[in-house]
Image (tube, rainbow, N blue to C red):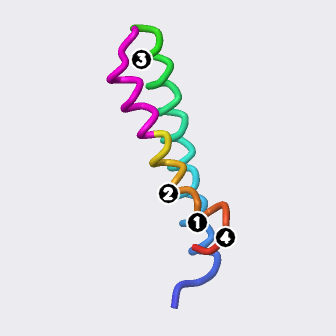
């Protein structure tokens, strides 16, 4: 059995990692818009949506 404080710390690091991925996807989308790359923009938007999907358990608190 894992102590609750360790689980909480792991969850905080995972959440921080996903937030950083969201920030990266924002920069990727902004850069794709700046250079006019529709393929890069599509990739950035898909990456953003994927990050949000992985964050759903954090939002609902069921993980």
Name, please, the residue furthest toward the left: 39
Marks 3 and 4, how far apart in space?
33 Å
Q: Which residue is mark 4?
A: 61
Label 1: how many Cα within 10 Å (few below 14, some 14–19, many 20+): few
Residue under label 1, please give it. 57
* Residue 42 is inside the magenta segment: yes
- Residue 32 marker: 3
Residue plotted at (32% across, 23% down):
39
Q: Which residue is mark 2?
A: 54
The structure residue drawn at horizontal position 47% and vertical position 24%, both measured from the top left corner, is: 29
Q: CA distance from mark 1 to mark 2?
A: 7 Å
* Residue in front for this viewpoint, 13 or 53: 53
Magenta residues (range):
36-47
Q: Position of residue 19 (x, y in %)?
A: 57, 45
Q: Say whether residue 34 is left or right of residue 61.
A: left
Disc nearer the start of the sequence (2/4) = 2
Q: Position of residue 55 (x, y in %)?
A: 56, 56
Tell me, yes or no, whether the two marked residues, 4 and 1, touch with CB atoms within 8 Å: yes
**Helix or strand or loop: what does disc 4 sit on?**
loop
């Amino acid at each position: 059995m894992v102590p609750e404080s360790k689980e909480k710390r792991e969850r905080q690091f995972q959440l921080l990692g996903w937030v950083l991925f969201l920030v990266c996807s924002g920069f990727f989308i902004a850069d794709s818009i700046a250079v006019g790359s529709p393929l890069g923009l599509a990739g950035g938007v898909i990456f953003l949506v994927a990050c949000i999907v992985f964050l759903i358990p954090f939002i609902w608190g069921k993980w």
